[in-house]
Amino acid sequence: MLNYCQSRYNIGITVKNGVEANVAKYKLLIVDLDGTLVNRSGDISEKDRHAVANATAAGVKVALSTGRIVRACRRIIDLLSLDGYHIFYDGALVSDPHQNKEVYTKPIDKEVVRRAVEFSRRNDTYLELYSSENFFAERENWSDTIHRRFFKVEPTFVDFSGIWERERIIKAELVVHNEEEAAKAESFRREFDGSLRFSIARAPAYPGIDFVNIIDPDVSKGEALKALVSFIGIPMSRVIAIGDGLNDISLLQVAGTAVAMGNAFPEVKEVADHITLDVEESGVAAVVERFVL
């Protein structure tokens, strides 16, 4: 396993008089949230906040890349004083929340949403649906407390009948914390294999819970990053990305330099060029200090 200060390809690093120097000036730092910037307390460490501020002060664009909805990121965007475009919904939306401008969006097909709603009702599966701004549910669920406390998002309870015609559904989600829910999620995945893409995200504050993100099969954080760099005119070689979850694999595979968190899934570490410290040890700050500044 690679440790921080070790790398597979040593991209952008040379050694001069025993001191490592960054020969590739990064223009974009793209960072996952939960498990990367956001720790198990639901906070961003002071060291990481300062590192992000230092990166932006040095002229490096900093963008978030997350499975979260826009509303669940506004507080963090404001806390870090970030301007510009970010990747939301696991790559299904690239937008600037301050300007309300979209660069790229790929909603779930309406017919697939209809089928998903009908299947979830027949099998008593709790299903969440997300538009660009709202989180919809048909009934209350134990996970509502997590959404409110951790993600700062309030569910909107509606009848899902015809919602595929009324709303642009960008993401769906299943939340799993026991064997029964896991079985229902697996049944749902088998039913929509090929029609939807599934990825598991976890928040350090809730290690026993899987947030199963469900999006259009052509969507990924990697494809969203391609759209973002094309729009802002930055070569992919000048992009450094940091992540920890399985939904970050495509992001790391596309970015010029890929960094996995110390707490990342083994599959994520496998595709990374470098491995930094754990989220509880301010691994993002370690990356910024070594590679960006």
Image (cartoon, helix red, strand yellow):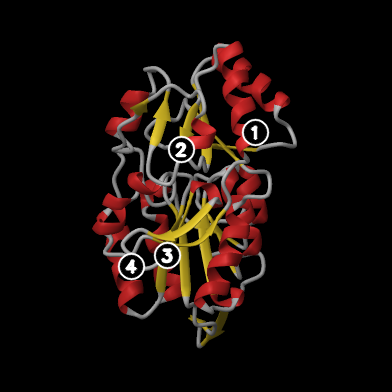
Determine if residue 66 is in view.
Answer: yes
Q: Residues within 10 Å of mark 2 (few under 14, many from 20)?
A: many
Give how far apart the Cα atoms at labels 2 and 1 are.
Answer: 14 Å
What distance separates the C-alpha of mark 4 from that of mark 2?
Answer: 23 Å
| Residue located beneath label 4 in the image | 83
Q: Nearer the viewer, residue 33 or 166?
A: 166
What's under tag 1, amino acid-wise?
A: Val
Disc on the earlier residue, 4 or 1 = 4
198 is higher (above) or lower (below) than 287: above
Decide which of tag 4 and tag 2 comes sooner along the chain: 4
Q: Is the residue marked by circle 1 packed among few (<14), some (14-19), or many (20+) residues within 10 Å?
A: some
Q: Which residue is mark 3?
A: 85
Lower position in the chain sequence, tag 3 or tag 2: 3
Identify the disc placed on residue 112.
Answer: 1
Above or below, comparing residue 199 to residue 56 in the picture: above
Marks 2 and 1, the one that precedes in the sequence: 1
Which residue is disc 2 drawn over?
130
Q: In the picture, residue 150 is in which quadrant?
A: top left
| Residue 180 falls in image quadrant | top right
Q: Secondary structure at mark 3?
A: loop
Cα distance between the residues tagged 4 and 1: 34 Å
